[in-house]
Image: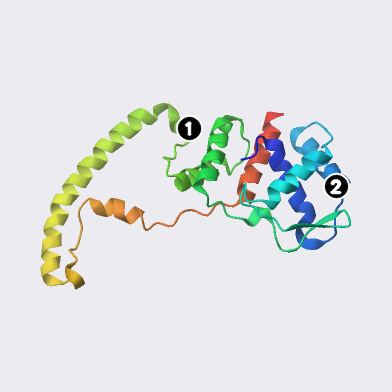
């Protein structure tokens, strides 16, 4: 995960320059564009160094963030060998990376001014197997979860008693191949969750949210 929000802004800017294959860019041009983007998002102009841009290109070319960007260089000019490539369309599938991003967003959650912030946090929570907690409910979450757990446990117990009887009846009426027993017990709740597809989360969503954070902080 990049050390700060500035890095994400630069990656997004470099990607914007190189995507589409409209033209090729020199290091100085990329530096200027990134400096302008940082000034727009963070509210202050700071010249980005050549070394920083070269490090950014190295990271984008690598698998560190899962980009593997096809950045090529000819005659001192940089471009994507695949004009249709964009880091914004890449899905985040690595659980370790998702965990790092989630940790960063949770730290700056209260400073975010972006309507998709909670949606992104919920997706990241699902990807990492963590329980999603809506920010507005954090203060009473202990009482809420304690009461909710009691109700859920009671409901599962009652259903399991009835469903085990139903399972016996259905097994007699509808034989199952290979002797598989019909299961309608409380285990069905947890087994069904394993069939749920993980949410799709793309880098474009992360960077949009991060931009909202940076503007709010200035």
Name the image quarter holding the N terminus: top right
Q: Position of residue 192 (x, y in %)?
A: 32, 56
The residue sitting at 15% across, 61% down in the picture is 167
Q: Position of residue 29 (x, y in %)?
A: 87, 47
CA distance for labels 2 and 1: 45 Å
User: Along the polypeptide, which appears first: circle 2 or circle 1?
Assistant: 2
Q: Position of residue 189 (x, y in %)?
A: 28, 52
Could you classify mark 1 by the number of other residues whose Cα lies within 10 Å: few (under 14), some (14-19), or many (20 or more)?
Answer: few
Say which residue label 2 marks: 27
**Residue 136, label in figure:** 1
Under circle 2, the secondary element is helix
On screen, residue 157 versus residue 36, left or right, reads left
Q: Quadrant of residue 132?
A: top left
Colour scheme of the picture: rainbow
Q: Position of residue 176 (x, y in %)?
A: 19, 71
Could you classify mark 2 by the number of other residues whose Cα lies within 10 Å: few (under 14), some (14-19), or many (20 or more)?
Answer: some
The residue sitting at 59% across, 52% down in the picture is 202
On screen, residue 148 versus residue 203, left or right, reads left
């Amino acid at each position: 995960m990049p050390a700060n929000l500035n890095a994400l802004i630069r990656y997004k800017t470099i990607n914007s320059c190189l995507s589409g294959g409209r033209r090729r860019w020199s290091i100085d041009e990329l530096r200027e564009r990134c400096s302008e983007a940082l000034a727009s998002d963070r509210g202050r102009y700071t010249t980005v160094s050549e070394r920083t841009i070269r490090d950014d290109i190295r990271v984008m070319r690598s698998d560190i963030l899962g980009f593997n960007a096809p950045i090529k260089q000819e005659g001192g000019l940089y471009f994507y060998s695949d004009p249709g490539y964009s880091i914004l369309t890449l899905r985040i599938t690595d659980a370790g990376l998702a965990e790092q991003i989630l940790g960063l967003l949770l730290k700056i959650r209260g400073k975010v001014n972006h309507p998709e912030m909670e949606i992104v946090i919920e997706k990241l929570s699902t990807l990492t197997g963590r329980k999603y907690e809506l920010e507005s409910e954090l203060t009473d979450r202990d009482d809420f979860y304690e009461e909710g757990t009691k109700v859920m446990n009671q409901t599962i117990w009652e259903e399991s008693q009835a469903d085990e009887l139903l399972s016996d009846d259905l097994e007699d009426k509808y034989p199952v191949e290979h002797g598989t027993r019909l299961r309608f017990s409380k285990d069905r709740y947890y087994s069904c969750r394993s069939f749920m597809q993980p949410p799709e989360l793309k880098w474009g969503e992360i960077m949009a949210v991060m931009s909202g954070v940076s503007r709010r902080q200035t």
